[in-house]
Amino acid sequence: MACRESGQLESQKTGKVLAAIAAAGIGAVIILAMIVTVVNRTPTINLNDYLYFETEGYDGYGSVTAEIDWDSIKEKYRNKISDTREGDPVDMLDAYIGINLEIDGDKQGRFSNGDEISYTWDMGATQLNQIKCKFEYTDGTYRVSGLQELGSFDPFEDIELVFSGVESEGNVELVLNGEKIPETYISCDREDGLSNGDRVKVMIHEDGVDYAAQHHGMIPDPLEKEYEVRGLDSYVTSAAQISREDMKALREKADSICREQVADSWEEGEQLESFTYIGNYLLSRKEGEQRGTDKNQLWMIYRVNVRNQYANDTSFYDDTNTFYFYVRFCDLVVTDDGTLNVDMDQWNIPKDQVEVRVSALNKSWYYYGYVTLETLYQDGIQNSLEAYNCENNVDETSGQPEITGDAPETDI
């Protein structure tokens, strides 16, 4: 009996142990199944949690970009997602997922604090199907903030206009003494054809405003300014504009030309008795008139007396004859300080000739010039009056010259 009980007691103990082992095995299977389920579960990424916006610039001239924090996604999900292809699946997400901002082209780079920008997600669906991961995302709006306040500056403190040239043909050059706005964004409404007293408007372009705002945090104010044209040289329109010293220099040059030219080819029997400066004609081209290559002309007039002598076996001639000569200078300019500018190496003299003829001796002398002051005026001045104004400063007080238009005939 004792062995049986004992046997019975041993049998009961063994049954309990087996039951406990069976229960533990079932628990391990359940835990393992749970681990496998967790390991094999597809992760879900809420993309909006990793979306951020960057603003740059100044209020009214700001820019906005949308970025996805891929570094944080990599850190959290690198070992939780997989791809059927080789490579880092998170890097592939970066290539397939993007964010679009709905920005009007005119608004780009011109955002202000408080502006709202709509955004939508751009998902490369075909490629994403190959990645074992789920995504949650919602489109939405972003309110701009963080842009700095703009200052202002006077752009014309750094702008200088330099005028050059001659009245009615003046030019302007814009000189920029600062770097807040590039010269390409600044212009003048007039650049040439200027006269003293004209107004030139300088304007700052809208691109220049943008540049200053984005690069310096300031906007130019004002955007326009007018300048008066000053300091241009002037073409001489009156002999009174020529100073006494400059007129003296002109006289000296003209005197030397006259003295040299009237006697250049003289022979025996011809002698210069005198040449007298009797004044000038100042021709200035009429406003708007394009005829005539010279802007002005200064005709310096001389009365020349020459003594002619000739004799043959039976007759003799000895007399003084008079003709008129000029030296003409062109394009005389008076600078802003009253100095005269003229090229004295450029001059003209008469091409016509007068003849002094002694019929009885069958002898003639020829001189460049005009028989009378009137013929000089008609031939040289009168024909130009449609295009030029004429100031007459000639004082002829010596009476009529002694030679005629047909050249005098003197009988001995």
Image (spheres, rainbow, N blue to C red):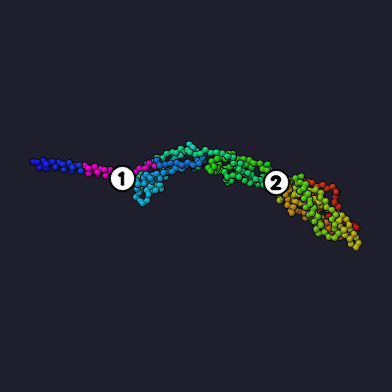
SS class of the residue under badge 2?
A: loop
Question: Which image quarter is the N terminus in?
Answer: top left
- Left or right: where does residue 150 sit relative to residue 313? left
Q: Residues within 10 Å of mark 2 (few under 14, many from 20)?
A: many
Outermost residue, bottom side: 313
- Left or right: where does residue 312 sit relative to residue 32? right
Q: Amino acid at mark 1?
A: Val
- Left or right: where does residue 35 sit relative to residue 335? left
Instruction: Tell me the number on the disc at residue 141.
Output: none
SS class of the residue under badge 1?
A: helix
Image coordinates for residue 356, horizontal then vertical, percent: 84, 56
Task: Report if residue 168 lies within the magenta region.
Answer: no
Q: Which mark's residue is nearer the viewer, 1 or 2?
A: 1
Q: Residues within 10 Å of mark 1 (few under 14, many from 20)?
A: few
Quote the CA–CA distance across marks 1 and 2. Answer: 92 Å
Give the residues drawn in magenta, as a range: 22-47
Image coordinates for residue 243, horizontal then vertical, percent: 76, 46
Q: Which residue is mark 1?
A: 39
Instruction: Judge by depth and name the residue closer to the eye, 278 or 371.
Output: 278
Q: Is there any visible trace of residue 385 in the rendered image?
A: no
Q: Residue at x 83, y 56 (%)?
A: 355
- The mark that comes first in sequence, 1 or 2, is 1
Instruction: Judge by depth and name the residue closer to the eye, 15 or 78.
Output: 15
Question: Which image quarter is the C terminus in?
Answer: bottom right
Q: Residue at x 47, y 41 (%)?
A: 55
Q: Which residue is mark 2?
A: 233
Q: Amino acid at mark 2?
A: Asp
